Image (cartoon, rainbow, N blue to C red):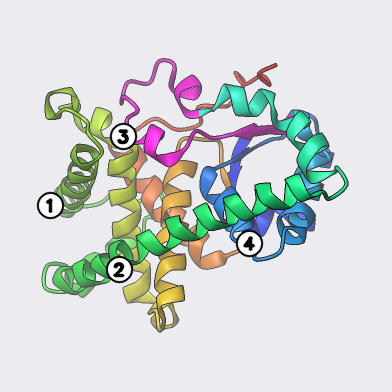
Amino acid sequence: MLVLVDNNFADRHGMRAYLAASRSNRAVLPSTVFEEWYKAKSPDTPRRVQQIVCSYPDQIFVLKHTRDLLHMAGEPPGMLFRLIDRQQTRDFAPYCDTVINAPMSPELEAHFAMHQANAQDHVNALLPEAHKMMGLFETWDREFTGEQIRSLRGIVGSGRMLSPELQRSTVEKAFRLGGGLSVAHGIDRAKIPTTDAGMANLLGVRYGFMTVALYVHMRSVSSMTPTSDKRVLNQLMDLKIAAQATYFDGFMTNEPDLDIIYQIGLGIVRALGGYSNCGRGRVSHAR
């Protein structure tokens, strides 16, 4: 089993219990999780929170950087190899030995300072995107009815199908978002798949599904409405992680709201015939 984990699960006892239960339990770390760890002001923090994953390095896989995944083709064959950064996965155990478990040194302090600055720059650059997303939600308030929002939220755990009209409206929004994101990252429009299933396999489109899912959940739970820039940013980063998790055999998070958002988005992916469970029964550690 190969699951993707977010940072609030990866550095807690649930992660240790999952990895210790069986050597066939594997975990994927996305680049966003490393950024969350590295943006801490003290190098002691990322070293401390990575102690658990570094105790089971042969069960850890490292995902490619988001910008690389956005260029990923939508065809299922070879999907796992396009998702996983095999070099970083091979180097994870040495990384633990030389960076996480090694005595602190001036060189390591400089290493963490560089990554801290890069992570903070990345987070700061996301704030305009996060506010743009909130503006988009205000537009969607004029396009989705309350009944449609309840129908979308109702697909979680029910196996219920959406009406053709609602499914098409939802898909068009996600495709518009994902297609625009793909083109913005330099993907030739001619190479974007033309089938629903092929489009549903693009990470940019899965971001679109998760954006719809976040909107649906936010409009269903009043406490989800962000009240600060930090909260808006966190919601954007969470949905990016959840979108990447849809390719794997599961998603592990300690945040119930995020799990619901993931389940809504995954339901839409599967309704279109998108690819998931890509690690099941076929994953081996790259060495």
Mark 4 and mark 3: Cα distance apart in space: 26 Å
- For disc 2, the marked residue is 150
Nearer mark to the viewer, of 1 and 4:
4
Q: What residue type is labelled 1?
A: Glu
Q: Which amino acid does label 2 sit on?
A: Arg
Q: Residue at x 79, y 30 (%)?
A: 23
Q: In which quarter of the image is residue 38?
A: bottom right
Q: Is mark 3 on a helix, strand or loop?
A: loop
Tag 4 or tag 1, which sits nearer the N-term? 1
Q: What stretch is highlighted in magenta?
A: 59-83
Q: Is residue 51 left or right of residue 274?
A: right
Q: Residue at x 26, y 38 (%)?
A: 185
- Between 37 and 253, the residue placed more toward the observer is 37
- For disc 4, the marked residue is 254
Q: Is residue 34 left or right of residue 198?
A: right
Q: Is mark 1 on a helix, strand or loop?
A: helix
Mark 1 and mark 4: Cα distance apart in space: 34 Å
Mark 4 and mark 2: Cα distance apart in space: 24 Å
The circle on residue 214 is none
Q: What residue type is labelled 3?
A: Leu
- For disc 3, the marked residue is 202
Nearer mark to the viewer, of 4 and 2:
4
Tag 2 or tag 1, which sits nearer the N-term? 2
- For disc 1, the marked residue is 165
Q: What residue type is labelled 4?
A: Asn
Marks 4,2: beta carbons within 8 A: no
